[in-house]
């Protein structure tokens, strides 16, 4: 089945609901709100979701699979994206209970659930699916730079770190582009984007020789569209994720970049050494992109969660002054400055 076939999902976060690691849960609640019936997180039972993550009003936070049954769920979705992509040992109890009650499991972990003997046997016994969204299947395409020849205008989000809002910016830009009448596509390159959109390739699980080839193939699938917003991954300067970031840059051959950044974050996630400055990231991404295809940064999308509106506006103003680029928080204040910049760059109506 496709992950969009599941329309009564319980999302498992178990203590991590308000943390950086629960970005899969947060995004599914935001972009597939109508398909989420409950969130399983015993440590946050009774707390309103909108107070924890900023949205999701009315979705109950529950303590067990047994409580979830009242909502007639068809699936349990693992709502975290931990470093290394492993299933927490303590979560097996939740998964096996869900399987016993006829719920399929949707996972975006690097660890493939179908390779787990215990879970696979339980799934076969109870006739449910283990859907490993991150598995790209056999893929052996080496990029040759042909994305540069496609007629679709390609806009790639790049980040100063992981978890700075690249996927959200990409989705919001697609929605804003459609509102102004452009034929716009969203290209999912990660597990959460695939869960939202229903197709794509989790490029961070593709063999490194073929990462750029996966990006090239994804661009081919939207070649007949006017503009494609391509979800970025990692950061070109993050020691753990720079490979996939460069693979997307050279495979997609973008015409434009939108840089995503969190004000005040000066270290990469999980890394002690300070990261490069925003200006250095802009210059480096442009230089690397232009090695394959003419490209420039057309704007900055700031992730201002946790800041007051006043402080967020001040950060946007300061960033625009520092970079000379249109800047916004696409969730708080919309995409208009970025859309106008792309309109000018591509001479779109």
Image (spheres, grey):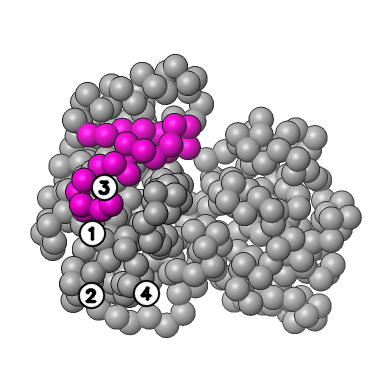
Circle nearer the N terminus (1, 2)? 2
Depicted 274 relative to depicted 308: above or below: below
Would residue 244 be found to the left or right of residue 286 on screen?
right
Q: Residues within 10 Å of mark 2 (few under 14, many from 20)?
A: many
Counting residues from the N terminus, which is met first, the one under dot 4 or under dot 2? 2
Q: Residue at x 25, y 78 (%)?
A: 142
Do the residues bearing badges 3 and 2 touch, measured as CB atoms within 8 Å?
no
Q: Earlier in the sequence, mark 4 or mark 3?
A: 4
Instruction: Depth check: give the residue in front, 345 or 40.
Output: 345
In front of the other: 144 or 336 = 336
Mark in front: 3 vs 2? 3
Is residue 326 highlighted in magenta?
yes
Residue at (89, 55) in percent of width and height:
70
Question: Which residues are the magenta region?
Answer: 325-349
Please tell me whether mark 4 sits on a helix, a strand or a loop. Answer: helix
Instruction: From the image, tell me which residue sits under label 4.
Output: 221
> Quadrant of the image for the N terminus?
bottom right
Q: How far is mark 3 from mark 2, CA to CA?
A: 26 Å
Residue with the mark numbered 1: 254
Q: Which mark is residue 143?
A: 2
Vertical arrangement, residue 14 with respect to residue 209, above or below: above
Graded by Cα atoms within 10 Å as few (under 14), some (14 to 19) or many (20 or more), the crowding at tag 4 reads few
Q: What SS does tag 2 mark? A: loop
From this view, report whether residue 258 is shown above or below residue 322: below
Res 147 seen here = no
Rendered location of residue 272, percent (x, y): 35, 36
Classify 287 as above or below 74: above
Residue where numbered disc 3 is placed:
342
Q: Position of residue 82 (x, y in %)?
A: 52, 51
């Amino acid at each position: 089945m496709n992950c969009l076939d599941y329309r009564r999902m319980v999302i498992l976060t178990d203590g991590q609901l308000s943390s950086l690691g629960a970005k899969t849960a947060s995004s599914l609640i935001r972009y597939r709100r109508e398909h989420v019936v409950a969130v399983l997180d015993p440590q946050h039972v009774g707390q309103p979701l909108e107070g924890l993550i900023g949205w999701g009003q009315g979705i109950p936070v529950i303590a067990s699979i047994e409580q979830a049954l009242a909502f007639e769920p068809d699936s349990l979705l693992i709502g975290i994206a931990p470093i290394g992509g492993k299933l927490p040992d303590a979560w097996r109890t939740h998964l096996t209970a869900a399987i016993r009650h006829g719920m399929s499991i949707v996972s975006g972990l690097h660890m493939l659930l179908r390779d787990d003997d215990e879970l696979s046997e339980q799934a076969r016994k109870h006739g449910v699916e283990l859907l490993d969204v991150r598995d790209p299947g056999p893929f052996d395409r080496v990029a040759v730079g042909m994305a540069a020849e496609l007629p679709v205008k390609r806009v790639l989000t790049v980040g100063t770190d992981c978890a700075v809002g690249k996927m959200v910016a990409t989705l919001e830009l697609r929605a804003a582009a459609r509102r102004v009448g452009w034929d716009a596509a969203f290209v999912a390159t990660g597990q959460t984007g695939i869960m939202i959109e229903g197709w794509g390739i989790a490029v961070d699980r593709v063999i490194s020789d073929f990462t750029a080839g996966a990006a090239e193939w994804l661009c081919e699938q939207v070649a007949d569209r006017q503009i494609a917003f391509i979800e970025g991954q990692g950061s070109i300067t993050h020691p753990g994720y720079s490979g996939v970031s460069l693979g997307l840059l050279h495979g997609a051959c973008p015409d434009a970049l939108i840089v995503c950044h969190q004000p005040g974050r000066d270290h990469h996630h999980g890394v002690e050494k300070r990261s490069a400055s925003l200006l250095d990231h802009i210059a480096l991404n442009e230089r690397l992109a232009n090695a394959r295809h003419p490209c420039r940064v057309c704007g900055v999308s700031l992730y201002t969660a946790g800041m007051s509106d006043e402080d967020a506006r001040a950060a946007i103003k300061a960033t625009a002054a520092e970079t000379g680029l249109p800047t916004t928080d696409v969730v708080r204040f919309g995409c208009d400055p970025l859309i106008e910049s792309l309109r000018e760059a591509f001479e779109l109506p």
